[in-house]
Amino acid sequence: MCSSWFGRTTEISVQRWRPEVLFERNGIEVSRETLRKWMVGAGLWLSRKQRRTFHQPRLRRESYGELIQIDGSEHRWFEDRGEPCTLLVFIDDATSKLMQLRFVPSESTTSYFGALRGYLDEHGCPVAFYSDKHSVFRVLRKEASGGQGMTQFGRALAELNIEILCANSSQAKGRVERANRTLQDRLVKELRLSQICDMDAGNLFLSQFLERFNERFSLKAVRPDNLHRPLNVAAVRLNDILCHREQRYVTEQLTMSYDRRQIILERGEVSEGLAGKYVDLYDYPDGRLEVRWKGHSLPYRVFSKDQRVSHTAIVENKRLGHALALVKAQQDLKYTPKVMTNSEKTGYKKRGRKVYGSQESSTPTQAALEMPV
């Protein structure tokens, strides 16, 4: 009886302190369950189900070519017949029409440049692309002192007058995400039936697959307008846009560093005055490298350093598989870097011994043979 009375008295006292515990936070200690019940009664507690967040569905854009969602899907597209790779997917937001498909080793700037060129040649320039926050599209380090505040892909789109927008979540670009899941099922089966086992054959197959897919699953846009603009750019100019471009400082020895290589400018009337200045480097997807100063191409030679994936390199998750494949290939080759002498670095060539007198015009070897014993 006393125990029951004591418990009732304690409950009354705790009930009297409830407002102070909930709103004044004056340090009164109660059990977790008691506090939860008080919060439920005060309307402050939400269950796990009630705390769930829901993404409001976004309506499609009304016009074809207004917004193109882009993404890369890493998958075993060829199953056990080939190595895993990435499929770059371009899909129109208004019609769910697949605009461009391309198999690439991984999501990289060079890969997207190739896919973008195919898109521009076939469809023209859309209003905007919609992507995730991959480093290809967005500068991750805002505090970086170098650069122009945009990625190489963003710089190329700016020169083409195309906007790039980054989604805050995967649900925001759900159309391309759902297309990736569909392709991982439907396209894999099509590739299996056609016995395709590598990226080159797969890219040839994608054009006919894309046409059949769009005939069956694409929708009609709300408005009949096509907002693609014609690509009024010459092929040579487009090559300069869709490449990796950087500026490099020229030392007093007319050298500069780029991509673990030392570039040495050939001495000439123009290059002699470039010490202490910046020149433009154009690194093309086909492997060509061009050095320019105010639009003029400069001759150079290259001293290559050890071409390897550098120790403790920062590799993004989407490129990890491709980076490991490169590392494995390098290890299989058992590459041993060659140590070059100073003469080889500077391009020094040994000349023969000069002989004076009547035999001055003869070669050193001939002169030595004709000399009397």
Image (cartoon, rainbow, N blue to C red):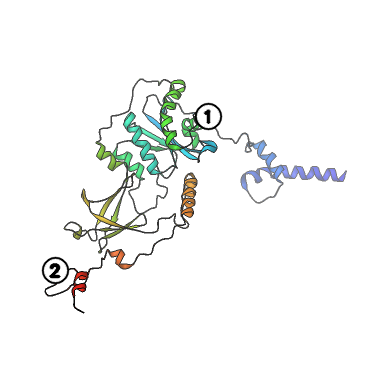
Picture quadrant where residue 337 is located = bottom left
* Quadrant assignment for the C terminus: bottom left
Q: Position of residue 64 (x, y in %)?
A: 37, 25
With respect to residue 197, does 320 lie above or below?
below
Amino acid type shown at disc 1: Lys
With respect to residue 126, does 2 lie above or below?
below
Picture quadrant where residue 88 is located = top left
Q: Is residue 286 left or right of residue 26?
A: left
Res 60 seen here: no
How crowded pointer 1 is (Cα within 10 Å; few <14, some 14-19, many 20+) is rated as some
Q: Position of residue 245 (x, y in %)?
A: 31, 48
Amino acid type shown at disc 2: Ser
Q: Is residue 318 left or right of residue 111?
A: right
Picture quadrant where residue 35 is located = top right
Residue picked out by circle 2: 361
The kind of secondary structure element at disc 1 is helix
Q: Position of residue 71 (x, y in %)?
A: 44, 36
Q: Pick out the residue farthest to the front.
A: 373
Q: Position of residue 77 (x, y in %)?
A: 50, 35
